[in-house]
Image (tube, rainbow, N blue to C red):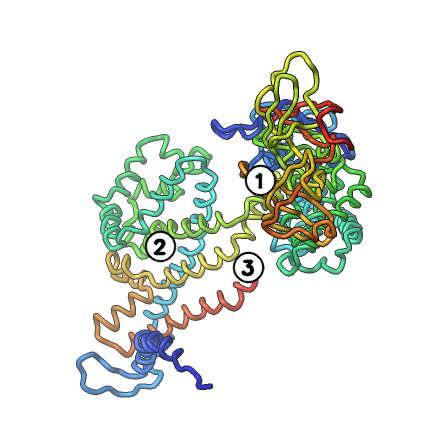
Amino acid sequence: MAGIKLRQVTKKYGSINVLNSINLDVADGEFLTLVGPSGCGKSTMLRIIAGLETQSTGDVEIDGTSVNDVRPSLRDLAMVFQSYALYPHLTVQQNLMTPLRLRDLDFWERLPLLGYLVPGRRAKMAKITEEVRTVAAVLKIEHLLNRKPGHLSGGQRQRVALGRAMVRNPAAFLMDEPLSNLDASLRVHMRAELSELHRELQSTFIYVTHDQAEALTMSDRIAVMMDGDLLQLGTPDEVYKNPNDIRVAEFIGSPKMNILPGVADPNGQVTCLGFVLDQSLEGTAQRPEQGPVSVGLRPEHLTLRPDDTEGCFSGKLTYKENLGSDVFLHLETEGFEQRVVLRVKPHEANFAKLGQNIFYSAEPGKMILFGADGKRVGLTTQQSNGKPD
Amino acid sequence: MRKSRAHYWFIGPAVALMILLLIMPVFVAATLSMTDYSLGNSSFNWVGIENYEKLFSRRSYQKMFSASLTYVLLVVPISVALGLGSALLISSLRFGGEMYKAVFFLPVMATLLAMAIVWEFALNPIVGVVNDVLRSGCDKSLVYGLLSGSWLGYEPTTSWYGAACIKKFPLWLGDKQYALGTIAFIGIWQGFGFNMVLYLAGLTSVPRELYHAAHMDGADSAWERFKLVTWPMLGPTNVFVITISSIRSFQVFDTVEALTGGGPSKSTYVMVYAMFEKGVKQNLLGIGSAITIVFLAFVLILTLVQVYFVNRRVHY
């Protein structure tokens, strides 16, 4: 078990910056998820931690010691790959044994045939076999031990890949999108299993995914990455409720946050789609945010209104997305090309017909404001302008 | 419902051509191998298996089999090993790989007959550049010391090079000790670039992630990773390369025809050359056909071994 630290880590391929000075502290035993769209540098970062790639500048520390010049196998980390990367010519048992054979047997003991003559090999092999059996029992893959990866289903391969990572009892697990090759229902199931496994092993997990749902459901903390920058690091709740950047706000949450155009006046009042909002900019003195701003509203923070009362937005219903437990209403607003999405209960949405004009309002105090540069701007609630609660 | 007969029209032309161009000639050869037919004769006599008896009893045909097999056993392992080695080295290069690929592949593209003539000049015992270079090393102590082994404390005159310096350098193609080896050398030089290209293609299909997994699992040396990932993943390529090289080496003909004509004293009398000599030059179609049938049997065995035994073990 170990904590992992990244200090000012950058990575360049030629003139392209893949990682811009990343600082990250992963606590011992933590489940940390690196999440971001493809190409944001999250997998590169994982491979730098693993030692499969070297950073251009900066330090990687494991358990307080710098591992910049330590080869991957000596960093005591295990990795689970997206494609599982099982050795196709070896049986499941041999696959699970490989890391132990390479660690515990010396060159002579690994030789085919001749190796059997080396004294002490039998005892070592017995120990390795025992450890493999234990891990196989934990993952419930004992009945697969004699099969080859080609004869396993996706979920079974996933377990074997996990097992190969577990047998060495590493200081930390690195996982590179391990669930993305599974079908939807199995993926949801494996999320729960991975979380349980993490609780049982009490080991550090660093998990890379582009799926924000995986990040929200499994992690202790999430690190949102975009274009080589670490934008926000926090618990799933923090990142969801208080995104500090418009890119984080749009990436985390499904359906994604509605971003409406607004204008801030010198008094801190924000006008959005022709309405003055019930919250205004924090502070009174300097207002650099004066001018265009973006107003973020989560779909679940918009409520339907029966008619056009004061402080209501409106839009034409273009699409109704029925998920059974919830209904997403997609609304088109005049003079604004992005659709607004509302999340409502099915019985509330019964009346709504396609093409109809729908009225809705924002729950007070739930809006999130971003300045022209995409950074979060603080808001305070006022009494005067909004509708009464 | 009436059954459509369109499928006959689709496969018909291919089947007809295959029978006409591939299967019929084999049957004709098999039939001729039981006769004493010569081209131009109006009739022939059935001789049964007499031609085959000759093949397996006469001294010159025993030499033929031994020359062909020796050639295959020399060329296949060496050209496969060189092909794999050069492919591994080239794929590990950061730049310059394209140049090496082109250089090693050139002999494959060149006409072997033209290349054979160049080799004939190079290997000429008197004016050839090979012996010239070797000879010029005899009076240079550095080269002499290295090649004759005198630096390692051996008596220089007992080594091959030391003895050759005193007496003379080999006649290469004119010496029955060296002729087959020299022909095999040209075969390797010409053929390994082809194997290299096949291996390069095989190497690109090995998933990168497997190497990463091997790194993580502790396969620290290149040799460990080769054993754990590269070699098993190249299995199908290996089978293909070995089969193709074996068949190609059984078929060696142009270098023999151009350089030695089967000699000296039948030391390079390989099967396809024998076929040509008996069937075409001496117009003994019966015995020529018999050699052809035996040759086909060899190739068939190789192919069957590939399909039935090896292929099953390398596809996971």
Is residue A59 positioned above or below B254 on the image? Answer: above
Q: Residue at x 48, y 39 (%)?
A: B92
Instruction: Answer with left or right where residue A330 lies relative to residue A195.
Output: left
Q: Tell me which amino acid carries mark 1.
A: Thr
The secondary element bearing badge 3 is classed as: helix
- Residue wearing tag 2: B184
Local crowd at mark 1 within 10 Å, few (<14), some, or many (≥20)? some
Helix, strand or loop under label 2: helix
Residue A333: which numbered mark, if any?
A: 1
The residue lying toward the viewer, choosing from A18 and B25, is: A18
Indicate the position of residue B122 as horizontal and vertical percent values: 25, 46
Q: Position of residue B20 (x, y in %)?
A: 30, 77
| Circle 1 SS class | strand
Which residue is drawn at the image coordinates 48% and 47% (left, top)? B204
B31 to A164, vertically: above or below: below
Q: Chain of mark 1?
A: A
Q: Amino acid at mark 3?
A: Val
Q: Amino acid at mark 2?
A: Ala
Percent across and percent down for residue A17 are 53, 28
User: Whole-Å distance between the Cαs marked 3 and 2?
Assistant: 29 Å
Q: Name the residue that disc number 3 marks.
A: B314
